[in-house]
């Protein structure tokens, strides 16, 4: 799909992956997330080669793909509770307050108790952003994070990404739209036929 | 890890309760298939009793297969399977949790239904404990072996037929031991030997099948 | 320890050339052994005191059955190597084995049926060995079916590898359960030639046939492997050179 790719992102920095449809943006992100194994090459974290499928590394990142993982037959809150229980990073007593504040932050406080089936695509994405907010991780791998979001939603993403970078985290995002960050902070990686 | 696995189990059970129709389908299928045999063969209970072990087990097997098809399919479609793949938890444990949910929702109800259907096939009441215990053990193995097939055929076109072709040969030992246990139960003889064999199969399956399921799920999600 | 010799097998052109060189070394001895064994078995060996000349089909039946299991084991081993060391050539070996294995299994079933028919007057009996071969045929067909159902070659390779490994682990259990089933139900049995008490002029052609079949399998595998490697490496420069 692509070859000769080499890049590094350090703490507090972001990388914006751009390219035409089919250029491999999703493939690249999935490879970083360990869902795909590269035919050649490796992924390193903190200078060490990571086994991208290793459980330890999985705890270091959050991957938000095209389709937010949500069960139609559960409410937003139930989905978020499941995500937290799956990850196991929050003690039980902190779960509900954390979900409440995350929903408020992404502007989805009213959506939490509705079945996901009844939510629009944009609303589902907000729930997914709440899930992102709830998962502490140094690395964010975001595939088209702002599609289907209105201006308010995009602002939420921008502020979340900025906050993540401010705490020394890393963000790799595939998106056409601006994340609202200064270009020096978020250089672009162009994937295309010539890359 | 255990917390995450229990969360998966609880979630699947909650989802099933919100769609009770889907849970009942395999059970109805079990009943329909069993009822077809007297219609296709003979209404004489003495003769039906002789084929009852085979009928019950094959029908239970086919009914289990029905619900196995969707074990991972919906999760794969709405992205929650990927969520489990990336959760930082041993995938085999999560796979075991999903399979446990399948057994609780399909295997166990089938087992509980079997005595009722057995009566329709002329099975004496004294055989019921034997039938319950053998099916309870056998359906555990069926769920596990079937989960391997379901994971391998994830996203494959017309995967249902292929799932059957892949899974059924692997269920031969369970079928053989299980039907024999049922036969002994009906004859009023001791079936502990056959039950031990069924239990051994179940232990073997519980230990190894989740590993194969996890490997297959990763491969299927690429 | 220097593992380069092992990793060379990961190179398709190397494997292709190696296969091409080795094929005659297996094919010719296979041919000679099989012809000799057939002569010995069909003509020289004395007729069985019970079955007359009918037993002679064992010279095709037994090696076929033996090979069918061996091919499955080779297929599963190659698939495991491909899965663990991510060697595409190993997956090509496994893929090449499948058709051969299914054919041997089918041959053992057909010869088994031909053997049994004069004895019981019917074409099929539930002899445990025939049943075991039937299940093995389904395992092969399942493997082939899974491969053809998945479009992406890499995914088909890896999924069918998992299936092959699961199958090879279960095969002894399936065989044991069928034998157990047989011991309870006393099914009719295709006449079993007692190996230890078989006289030498009956045994020798059988062993020779077994070895001949094994070499034959190796030769056919190498030929199919070459075709499989060429197909997989279609676009590569070395393939264009070979084909032209």
Image (spheres, coloured by chain):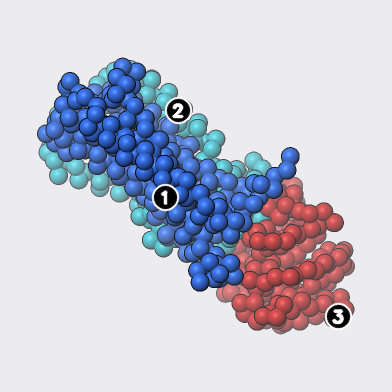
Chain colours: A red, B cyan, C blue
The quarter of the picture where residue B105 lies is top left
The disc placed on residue A74 is: none
Q: Can residue C148 be seen in the rendering of this structure?
A: yes
Asked if labels 3 and 2 touch by Cβ distance under 8 angstroms, the answer is no
Q: Is residue C64 or residue A175 the one in the foreground?
A: C64
The quarter of the picture where residue B184 lies is top left
Circle 1 chain: C
Q: Is residue A154 rendered to the left or right of residue B24?
A: right
Q: Is residue A20 rendered to the left or right of residue B47?
A: right
Q: Is residue B92 rendered to the left or right of residue A181?
A: left
Q: Can residue B10 be seen in the rendering of this structure?
A: no
Mark 2 Cα within 10 Å, few/some/many (few <14, many 20+)? many
* Quadrant, the C terminus of chain A: bottom right
Q: Kindly identify which residue carries mark 2.
A: B199
The quarter of the picture where residue C236 lies is bottom right
For marks 3 and 1, give the CA distance: 64 Å
Q: Residue at x 39, y 55 (%)?
A: C145
Q: Is residue C82 above or below residue A69?
A: above
For marks 1 and 2, give the CA distance: 42 Å
* Callout 1 secondary element: helix
Q: Residue at x 66, y 47 (%)?
A: C5
Q: Is residue A5 above or below residue B100?
A: below
* Callout 2 secondary element: helix
Q: Kindly identify which residue carries mark 1.
A: C220
Q: Is residue C23 or residue B41 the one in the foreground?
A: C23
Circle 2 chain: B
Q: Kindly identify which residue carries mark 3.
A: A182
For marks 2 and 3, give the CA distance: 64 Å
């Amino acid at each position: 799909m692509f070859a000769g790719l080499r890049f590094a992102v350090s703490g507090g920095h972001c990388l914006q992956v751009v390219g035409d449809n089919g250029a491999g943006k999703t493939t690249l992100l999935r490879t970083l997330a360990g869902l795909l194994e590269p035919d050649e090459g490796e992924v390193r974290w903190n200078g060490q080669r990571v086994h991208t499928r290793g459980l330890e590394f999985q705890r270091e990142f959050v991957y938000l793909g095209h389709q937010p993982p949500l069960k139609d037959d559960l409410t937003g809150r139930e989905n978020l509770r499941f995500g937290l229980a799956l990850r196991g990073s929050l003690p039980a007593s902190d779960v509900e307050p954390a979900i409440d504040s995350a929903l408020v932050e992404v502007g989805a406080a009213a959506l939490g108790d509705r079945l996901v089936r009844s939510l629009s695509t944009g609303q589902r994405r907000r729930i997914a952003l709440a899930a992102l907010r709830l998962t502490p991780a140094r690395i964010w791998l975001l595939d088209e994070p702002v599609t289907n979001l209105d201006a308010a939603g995009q602002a939420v993403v921008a502020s979340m990404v900025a906050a993540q970078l401010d705490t020394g985290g890393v963000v790799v995002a595939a998106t056409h739209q601006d994340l609202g960050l200064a270009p020096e902070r978020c250089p672009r990686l162009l994937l295309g036929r010539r890359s | 890890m255990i917390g995450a696995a229990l969360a998966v189990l609880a979630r699947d059970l909650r989802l099933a309760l919100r769609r009770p129709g889907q849970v009942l389908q395999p059970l109805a299928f079990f009943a329909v298939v069993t009822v077809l045999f007297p219609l296709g063969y003979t209404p004489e209970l003495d003769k039906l009793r002789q084929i009852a072990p085979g009928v019950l087990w094959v029908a239970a097997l086919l009914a289990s297969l029905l619900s196995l098809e969707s074990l991972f399919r919906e999760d794969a479609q709405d992205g929650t399977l990927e969520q489990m793949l990336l959760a930082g938890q041993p995938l085999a444990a999560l796979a075991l949790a999903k399979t446990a949910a399948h057994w609780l929702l399909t295997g166990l109800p089938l087992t509980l239904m079997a005595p009722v259907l057995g009566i329709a096939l002329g099975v004496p009441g004294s055989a019921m404990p034997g039938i319950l215990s053998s099916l309870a053990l056998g359906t555990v193995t069926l769920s596990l072996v079937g989960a391997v097939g379901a994971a391998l055929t994830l996203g494959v076109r017309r995967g249902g037929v292929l799932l059957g072709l892949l899974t059924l040969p692997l269920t031969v030992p369970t079928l053989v031991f299980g039907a024999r246990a049922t036969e002994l139960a009906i004859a009023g003889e001791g079936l502990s030997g056959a039950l031990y064999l069924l239990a051994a199969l179940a232990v073997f399956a519980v230990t190894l099948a989740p590993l194969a399921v996890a490997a297959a799920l990763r491969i299927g999600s690429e | 320890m220097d593992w380069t010799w092992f990793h060379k097998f990961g190179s398709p052109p190397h494997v292709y050339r190696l296969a091409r060189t080795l094929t005659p070394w297996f094919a010719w001895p296979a041919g000679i052994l099989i012809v000799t064994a057939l002569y010995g078995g069909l003509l020289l060996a004395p007729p069985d005191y019970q079955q007359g000349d009918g037993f002679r089909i064992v010279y095709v039946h037994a090696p076929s059955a033996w090979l069918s299991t061996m091919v499955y084991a080779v297929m599963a081993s190659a698939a495991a190597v491909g899965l663990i060391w991510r060697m595409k050539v190993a997956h090509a070996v496994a893929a090449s084995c499948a058709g051969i294995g299914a054919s041997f299994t089918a041959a053992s079933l057909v010869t088994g049926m031909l053997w049994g028919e004069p004895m019981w007057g019917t074409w099929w009996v539930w002899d445990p060995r025939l049943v075991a071969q039937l299940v093995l045929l389904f395992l092969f067909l399942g493997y082939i079916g899974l491969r053809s159902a998945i479009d992406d070659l890499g995914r088909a390779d890896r999924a069918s590898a998992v299936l092959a490994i699961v199958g090879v682990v279960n095969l002894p259990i399936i065989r044991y359960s069928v034998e157990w089933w047989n011991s309870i139900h006393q099914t009719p049995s295709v006449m079993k030639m007692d190996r230890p008490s078989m006289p030498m002029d009956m045994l020798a052609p059988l062993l020779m046939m077994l070895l001949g079949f094994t070499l034959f399998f190796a030769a056919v595998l190498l030929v199919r492997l070459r075709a499989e490697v060429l197909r997989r490496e279609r676009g590569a420069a070395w393939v264009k050179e070979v084909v032209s």
